[in-house]
Structures are given as structure tokens and as C-alpha cells.
Amino acid sequence: MIDVLFDDRQDIMEVTEDNMKAIEGAIAAVLKTEGAEGDYEVSVSFVTNDEIKELNREYRNVDSETDVLSFPMDDDDEFDGVIILGDIVISTQKIIEQANDFGHSLEREMIYLTVHSMLHLLGYDHMVDSEKEEMRLREKEVMKELQIFK
């Protein structure tokens, strides 16, 4: 079982039921691809560029906007048998900007950012080239599994 808690704190882009179902499917696909078993909880928040910039400055000491932030919980955070993976925070303004820049749909960008962030919650990173290559490979694998190409 996967419980996804949604928090929409912006009014830039409408986040629909279909979007939320697609995000739930992306989270499930990442867990499946990674061979994760059990019950999980993840929170997904939609915010403005201003809010994500503030979070980025506060938690990463980076004074700029970003598309997505991941806040993993400690490995042993479990409640009634549910593993709490952490929080995903997505800027809807960045979804729109990047979808336009890359020429693909808003949903594809939203799902890609979710997959990317989920991999961070599971311990992947991209600070050095070898880690970046592995993470990109995992992202492509999940996006292919979801049949999301454009």
C-alpha cells in the first residue's frame, strides 16, 4: 500500500485528480522498479517559485528557485508498519517553465520531477558523475515503465 498525501499551496496551475493519480502511479512505479516492498507514505506539496526558493535557502543554503526538493525521512521512520519516505515539494511555476522549455506536456514534467524526487527519497543523488549517470538511468527506466515519453 502506498499512501500519498497531497498539499496544494499555490494557485499558478490547477492540480487535477488525474494529475494526482498519475503521481501516485509514478511513486508506485519507482518503488516497484527499486524492488521496495511494504507499506509507504509520501507527501507531495505543490508550491510557488517564491516558496520553493525560501525552502531551498532555508534547508540547502541555496538562494535560488528550483524545480523540486526532496526531504527524506530517517531510515527507521515507521509508524504502524508504514515506512514514511519523506516529502516532495514541487514548484508548479517550474513545471510550466520547463515543460515549455523542453517541449513536452505539463503532466510529463510533473511525473518526471516526482520520479526524480522519489529516487532522492530512496537515497540516490547526482553530486558526482557516476551517481548522476546511475540516477538518470533509473529515471529513464521508470519513465519507460510508465510509458511517458513526451
Image: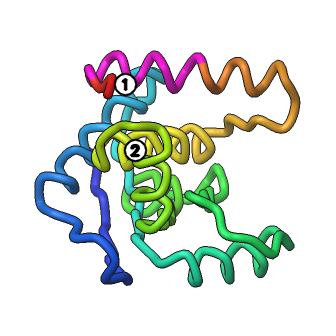
Of the numbered discs 2 and 1, the one sitting upstream in the chain is 1
Q: Which mark is residue 109?
A: 2
Residue at (29, 42) in percent of width and height: 105
Residue at (40, 71) in percent of width and height: 46
The answer to if 13 sits in the magenta stretch is no
Q: Which residues are magenta?
A: 137-147
The answer to if 143 sits in the magenta stretch is yes
| Quarter assignment of residue 129 | top right
Q: Pointer 2: residues within 10 angstroms few (<14), some, or many (20+)?
A: many
The secondary structure that most of the magenta stretch takes on is helix
What's the residue type where badge 1 is placed?
Lys
Q: Is residue 80 above or below residue 2?
A: below
Instruction: Identify the secondary structure beneath mark 2.
Output: helix
The image shows residue 113 at horizontal and vertical percentages of 48, 46
* Front tag of 2 and 1: 2
The image shows residue 56 at horizontal and vertical percentages of 72, 72
Q: Is residue 73 above or below residue 141?
A: below
Residue at (46, 51) in percent of width and height: 83
The image shows residue 63 at horizontal and vertical percentages of 81, 75
Question: Which residue position holds label 1?
Answer: 32
Q: Which quarter shows the N terminus?
A: top left
Instruction: Identify the secondary structure beneath mark 1.
Output: helix
Question: Which residue occupies the extreme left position in the image?
Answer: 17
Q: Pointer 1: residues within 10 angstroms few (<14), some, or many (20+)?
A: few
In the rendered structure, the answer to whether residue 56 lies left or right of residue 148 reads: right
| Quarter assignment of residue 39 | top left
Residue nearest the viewer, comparing 41 with 104: 104
Colouring method of the image: rainbow
Q: Is residue 129 above or below residue 70?
A: above
| Quarter assignment of residue 116 | top right
